[in-house]
Image (cartoon, helix red, strand yellow):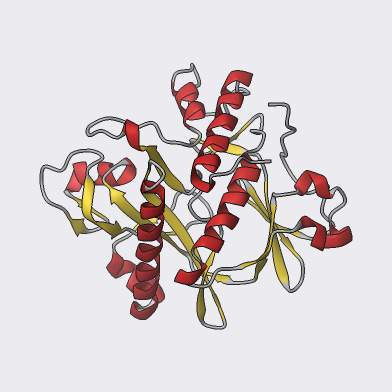
Amino acid sequence: MGAQALSTAADLIKAPLIYKGKVRELYDLGEHFLIVVTDRISAFDYVLDPAVPEKGNVLNRLSAFWFEQTAQLGPNHVVHTDVDRLGDIVTEPERLRNRIMVTRKAERIDIECVVRGYITGGGWRQYQQTGEINGIALPPGMRKNERFPQPIFTPAAKNDVGHDEDIPFSRMEELVGAELAAELRERSLALYEYAHGYCAERGIILADCKFEFGLIDGQVILIDEIFTPDSSRFWAEGNYAFDIEIDSMDKEPVRTYLLGSVWDKNSKPDPLPDTVVEATTKRYLDIYRRLTGTELK
């Protein structure tokens, strides 16, 4: 690919680093936050080596694209994505071009808002065991990957350590209050419906997705990332079928490689082969092109 991957931005930014996630880094600019999206990639709870060139560019630019597309559905946290406006806060702006997002500071609501349009993944596993997903009773005899008559809202309580916890909507009401829970559900379902229709026009199925929201002066604000390959499950329309594991349009080459390797799953895997890294970069560039209609430059 020829592009240089970005594993961290800590040596490029003269501002306090206040959070480092698997992919994103959060810096404090005083009035605002600065989010930097790196090329780090994770799978099965491990951050892998090497980083995947262009991945951070795709994730950040897709989020910016979708935040703009969905602004009519409700406010979000974006202030701007122009690295040149950061001045001397950034020591090498070209390395961070298209990777940054300056945002308003919101108080995060500790609920992951998940919308499922199709019964797959963790939802399918719940259904097989209980006939329900997050306490929602479903008809017997549903088939893997079948589309729901209406999308369902299946929240999870966020945990900074370990996995998020799937919870019924009634538990979400207890945690955040009935009024806020209802607003988050309504916002999430509206966002999914909009994006599902947009994707369908481009030969892509949006199977499920997740959102995070925060509060600014009592107002609900959409934060973090939206409709990226890291936060959503995209399927090519031509691959859709029941009863199979559909190849997702994301880091599937990494998962496939690891599952087919001799990795013991109890320690960090060995570095990924160049062919897997290159295939993954191509996946991210392809979903960006198909969703936006433009090439990543």
User: Is residue 286 positioned above or below 82 on the image?
Assistant: above
- 30 vs 173, left or right, is right
- Do we see residue 121 in this rendering? yes
Q: Position of residue 293 (x, y in %)?
A: 53, 44
- 141 vs 4, left or right, is left
**Image quadrant in which the C terminus is located:** top right
| Residue that appears at 73% across and 31% down | 3
**Image quadrant in which the N terminus is located:** top right
User: Is residue 248 positioned above or below 175 on the image?
Assistant: above
User: Is residue 78 positioned above or below 249 on the image?
Assistant: below
| Residue that appears at 49% across and 62% down | 212
Residue projecting furthest to the bottom: 217
Residue projecting furthest to the top: 262
Q: Position of residue 181 (x, y in %)?
A: 36, 73
> Which quarter of the picture shows residue 137?
bottom left
Residue projecting furthest to the left: 140
